[in-house]
Amino acid sequence: MVKHAVEANFDGLVGPTHNYAGLSWGNVASKSNVNAVANPKEAALQGLAKMKQLADRGYVQGVLPPHERPHIPTLRALGFEGTERQILEAVASTDPSILAAVSSASAMWTANAATVSPSTDTADHRVHFTPANLSAKFHRAIEHRVTGRALKSIFTDESYFAHHPALPSVSHFGDEGAANHTRFCSRYGEPGVELFVYGQVAFNEQAPAPAKYPARQTLEASQAIARLHGLSDRHAVFAQQNPAAIDAGVFHNDVIAVGNGNCLFYHQLAFLDEDRVLAELRDRLIGAELEAIRVSSAEVPLGDAVASYLFNSQLLNTPDGMLLAVPGECREVASVSRYLDDLVKTGGPITAVEVFDVKQSMRNGGGPACLRLRVVLNHEELQAINRGVILNDALYDRLVSWVNAHYRNELSQQDLADPMLLDDVRKALDELTGILGLGSIYDFQR
């Protein structure tokens, strides 16, 4: 029997060390804002405001916590010794790039936190989670252990939820999580088809691959996750991202395509074999016809799509159709703004466009879609989770007060070596785990 289900969004709360270190080669926005002074408090409040707007409209909105940064255990593993103050002084003077990496607040982009398969798709009818190893980038490859702890602390009941460790952290199994994964269905509670998008085939050097920027997701990683989650062929489609798009700065599929329900909104350069991908999705989608909205290069040049993050938007169900929640930059790029005006007039599935201000995140290369992890839950599963992370008015007010109490208005690269910053971060996170009811998920708490 098909059960009623909802798609909950779990947004990453921007961390206290949000800064612009330009760590992500292949992410144009990240590199273009390197060394700018960040405002962690503004970034966190912008993220919370987006969550609140969606929660107020009736969407189930959860909160995922930031990570402990700078991460001293990683520095110790790299051979830095002494007190924490001595370690910070040593790495700042000899290897400031390493300090920047272990101080990154990149866990805020929870689209990269994990891949999630709903219970209606999996063989054992549980919701499956696999944290992404994010092996392509050192600063992100250190996230998956705490991410896994946080997910287990929220989705605790093993009769409903299955948790897998991250895949081996090597390039052959590079996995970037839900940023390269989209699920299509007629209704959330119905069986669906999961689209896994990869950048290269690791064990075939002759296969097409980008030439300028690295492909972060491999076919082998996507296939492994489908196996771990117990997905049959009926529930999975594998598609290669267009190498030309990766070389243009489309480092994840969610920078060039977004889907919801039976709708796929994508750029014509998104997939290497567009016709095959669409045909397989149409063949496997049960109970509905795929509605594919193809944006041509003539309408929106690829460079404009990357600059605006048009496709790194949230596509949400409303009583009157679908809402496309876009970053404010979409109204600053002429071709994109014109396209959006025309889009809502077409009579298609997307009936409304709304702008969200996430500028602090955008400057580091993450739009509205990067900030959220989508989890389809039926009624029983929703009741079984840790309800302390579900945003309501009281939690929102408490988190705003928490941010105002603990976050700085400015943060530069030089500030990362300040031992007081580490103390402030730990104090804040210790308080946050109490607010959200997560228990001891951080290394300093264990």
Image: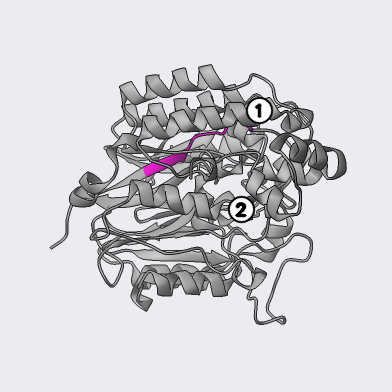
Q: Is residue 13 magenta?
A: yes
Instruction: Name the residue located 68 percent from the left edge and 65 percent from the top edge.
Output: 243
At 74% from the left and 41% from the top, the residue drawn is: 100
Q: Quadrant of residue 136?
A: bottom right
Q: Is residue 150 above or below residue 432?
A: below
> In the rendered view, would you say 209 is above or below 415?
below
Q: Quadrant of the N terminus?
A: bottom left
User: Number of callouts in the render?
Assistant: 2
**Marker disc for residue 101:** none
Q: Is residue 159 magenta?
A: no
**Residue 122 or 435: which is nearer the viewer?**
435
Residue type of the residue flagged with mark 2: Ile
Could you tell me residue 11's position as x and y percent? Answer: 45, 39
Query: Which one is nearer the viewer's eye here, 287 or 15?
Result: 15
Q: Which residue is the site of mark 1?
A: 421
Residue 142 or residue 59, whichever sits in front: 142
Q: Is residue 87 left or right of residue 261?
A: right
x and y, in percent, of residue 276 in the image? 50, 73
Q: Secondary structure at mark 1?
A: helix
Q: What are the residue bounds of the magenta stretch? A: 9-17
The residue most toward the left is 1
In the image, what residue type sits under mark 1?
A: Leu
Q: Which residue is mark 2?
A: 142
Name the residue: 69% across, 33% down: 19
Q: Quarter of the image holding residue 216?
A: bottom right
